[in-house]
Image (spheres, rainbow, N blue to C red):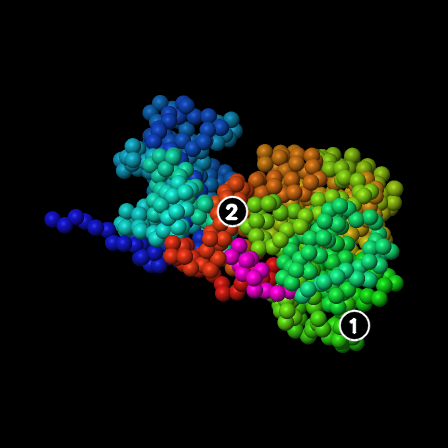
Amino acid sequence: MMPDTKPIADLTTSLTYLPGIGPQRAKMLEAELGLRTFGDLLFYFPYKHIDRSRIYSIDELTADMPFVQLRGEILSYEEEGEGRKHRLIAHFTDGRSVIDLVWFGANAIKWTRRSYHTGTIYIVFARPSLFNGRINLPHPDIEDASKLRLSAMGLQPYYHTTDRMKKGGMNSRSMERFTQTLLTRYDIQLPETLPASLVQRLCLVDRTSSVKNLHYPTTADELRRATYRQKFEELFFIQLGILRFSRKRQQEVYGHVFGHVGELFNTFFHQHLPFELTGAQKRVIREMRHDMGSGKQMNRLLQGDVGSGKTLVALMTMLIALDNGYQACLMAPTEILAEQHYATFREMLAGMPVRVELLTGNVKGKRKRQPILDGLRNGDVNILIGTHAVIEDTVEFSNLGLVVIDEQHRFGVAQRARLWQKNDTPPHVLVMTATPIPRTLAMTLYGDLEVSIIDELPPGRKPIETQHYWEERTEALYHGLRTEIAKGRQAYIVYPLIKESAKMDMKNLEDGYEHLCQVFPDLHLSKIHGQMKAAEKDAEMQRFINGETQMLVATTVVEVGVNVPNASVMVIQNAERFGLSQLHQLRGRVGRGAEQSYCILVTKYNLSSDTKKRIRIMCDTNDGFEIAEADLRLRGPGDLEGTQQSGVAFNLHIANLARDGQLVQMARDTANEILDQDPEQNLPEHASMWRHLKELAQTNIDWSNIS
């Protein structure tokens, strides 16, 4: 008799054809999780595994326990509360004691009453919770005890699902059934993607075993080895793609040669410098001079905390371009910031033979715009500062040699590409950010850029003092504000504006503004938020910059940009609702003059442990890199803005840049070794690896050339 053989899985098959899914569920899986094929489901890994081999008794439970299992029956149901507090309670017994199972939400209540009945023995699985001094089990998983074989459960996988999926009856257990069906009905054979020598040297399990064991491991060690293999593979291919493009660009893309430092740079350095350059500023200017004189296109990321002097470095780099007969351009994300750069450059270059022009959406009409456009075309305009208006087709340069992009994450990749194409020979690119990027993240997001860091503040700057106030301490807060304003200083009062609760946040801002007008009737206040027209917003901002108003009540629109050296206090209301990096950015709006500045974080009294950590870190350090590392640890890398820039698919199924820093470095080192061994990408033993990298690429555009 022939043995039963499973069909080999075609991973491109639509999930519609997997038993138990069908067209409607397939549609939901695609809309909510982006899963379309057998292969997508196979690589949708659980976020955790829990040992389901033990049954607890109700008497053993405490409120601080992780997930537990109980065996017993539902005695009765009752419903309590109204509106959002409406809940279904099931009184559940294990034969010795009774505990409440609780569900909220009309759909969950209806579904539970229909599905689980009194008198049936169930296995209940949930995390214990404390409510009104009693332990209960909210939204438990429930299985018919007769269908569950505990010895076979072992490590059970848990999959992320969305609220919409749960409302449609698809939870983690549903996902578990789908993956189980895929793995038991079909023979899964994945081609090896890593060279055999590498798998052997790093003691990695094979690819097929690692993927299967990531769903259903039999032991904790099996899960650990499967996880390690998959994490390494993900990070290795990201680094391989980035480094391959980077090497290709270095070999193929030539840049203008800025062979000398001339009269403009030297005149500015000796006669116009507003203050002595820090050692860090001198170092990064040297790094850029080297790049721009090498004959290769410069593609450099300049990181520096708010107030570290990046703008001055950018201006001096532009003067090197001018000295070599080229034009320079600075692109800023907002009109206010572009105008501020324009005013700063004009002031610093006063008396020097350098024509600086501003091009934003506000520069309208042929009479205003045409002279600028003509000057760019014939080379009379040396430096152009603007917003995305500079990438319009009508903007043509005579000889663009250097592009500086400020706060680059606020521009789309395609927008930057258009600026890059305004010359036959690509201009040198300097990307600046005041958002410190942790090393592992920079290695991954900006792995193809050289990185320069300004890690010193200019002389005379005093560290900002950060204090935490409970929202009840208004008298002390108002007294401190009055004291600073009496010295002639100004203050920002920032309210959150979060999309999910925008209406409530706007009311808080409006109410806060009215309240402050009553508390400080003798002062002038400005107010800005993103829902105002651009002209109104700019006018209010300008009043604050000019010192006509003493307080600026705002949402986070002040996070990036304006420089008001006279502002010495930043009050952040509901600080618990902001991430660490955003709090640090907001704090950087003050501390720009020589006076002592303060950042006041106002929060409600009840805070989660993560929020307490965030507030403590903010009060303890002003170091942006320390804060960025802590933010990455606390929040994870999030959606990694701009992750398709490198020309490789950037979908981290399982690796975590916050926790896997050493593995990122190891993957990068290994990728560099491979490229050294096989620069032409033609060694037979690497064929499957290069093929897999090609499959991962989702675009034909080499975005790494753009920055």
Look at the numbered disc 2 and give the secondary structure of its residue. helix
Residue hosting label 2: 669
Label 1 CA crowd tier, 10 Å (few <14, some 14–19, many 20+):
some
Residue 638 seen in the current view: yes
Mark 1 residue type? Asp
Percent coordinates x, y for residue 12 in the rendering: 35, 59
What residue is at 28 percent from the left and 51 percent from the top? 186
2 or 1: mark nearer the eye: 2
Instruction: Magenta stretch: give its range.
Output: 243-255
Percent x, y for residue 662?
A: 52, 41
Helix, strand or loop: magenta stretch? helix
For image coordinates 57% across by 40% down, the residue present is 633
Q: Quadrant of the C terminus?
A: bottom right
Residue 142 screen position, x and y as percent? 36, 38
Whichever of callouts 2 and 1 sits on the residue coming sooner in the sequence is 1
Q: Residue at x 31, y 47 (%)?
A: 183
Vertical position of residue 492 compared to residue 61: above or below? below
* Left or right side of 214 for 347: right
Residue 568 position, x and y percent, is 80, 44
Reading the image, the residue beneath label 1 is: 380
* Kind of residue indicated by mark 2: Asp
In space, the residues marked 2 and 1 are separated at their CA atoms by 47 Å
